[in-house]
Amino acid sequence: MKNFKMNYDQILYSLSKSKFRSSFHLKQKDTEYINNKGLTKIKEHAYDFIKKRLAPAIIENDGKQTPMRGHPVFIAQHATATCCRGCLEKWHKITPGKELSQKEIDYIVELIMAWIDKEYKRI
């Protein structure tokens, strides 16, 4: 896994060079949801989604567990390559087949929130 102290802006910049990753953006509906719930609640949702859908060692539907729309965190997961264990391995060097540590979960959520914050300010 990459160094956790790495600057999130640098990671987001690297991801923005991918045509696929850079195609994801928050839509008006997503920003309204953030306005209604607040970023603290969105971060709680991110922790919940990551712990349930990404943290287990074995994920039955890995590669298909993150919807492409429906919640700002889902959009952010695709934009940040934190949507499945394959992407986590490819982009973030997080080994599949083992339960994520709390440090890895925190890293993923902070990256998701950095993307959401950046995207939210863009609108």
Image (cartoon, grey):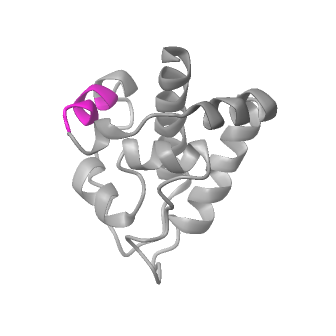
Q: Is residue 17 magenta?
A: yes
Say left or right for 48 vs 2. Answer: right
Above or below: residue 107 compared with residue 87? above
Q: Position of residue 80 (x, y in %)?
A: 38, 42
Indicate the position of residue 30 as horizontal and vertical percent values. 62, 37
Measuring 71% from the left and 30% from the top, which residue is drawn there? 32
The mark total stands at 0
Quick check: 35 left or right of 13?
A: right
Residue stretch in magenta: 11-18
Give the percent coordinates (x, y) of residue 48.
67, 56
Is 21 placed left or right of 99 in the picture? left
Q: Is residue 23 magenta?
A: no
When the figure is inspected, residue 75 is found, relative to residue 27, above or below; the finding is below
> Where on the picture, by quarter, is residue 94?
bottom left
Q: What residue is shown at x 47% (from left), y 78% (from top)?
A: 59
User: Viewer-proximal residue, 96 or 80?
Assistant: 80
Q: Quadrant of residue 50?
A: bottom right
Q: Nearer the viewer, residue 12 or 36?
A: 36
| Residue closer to the observer: 53 or 106 | 53
Tell me where residue 114 appears, x and y as whole percent: 49, 28
Q: Is residue 29 left or right of residue 54?
A: right
Magenta stretch, main secondary structure, is: helix
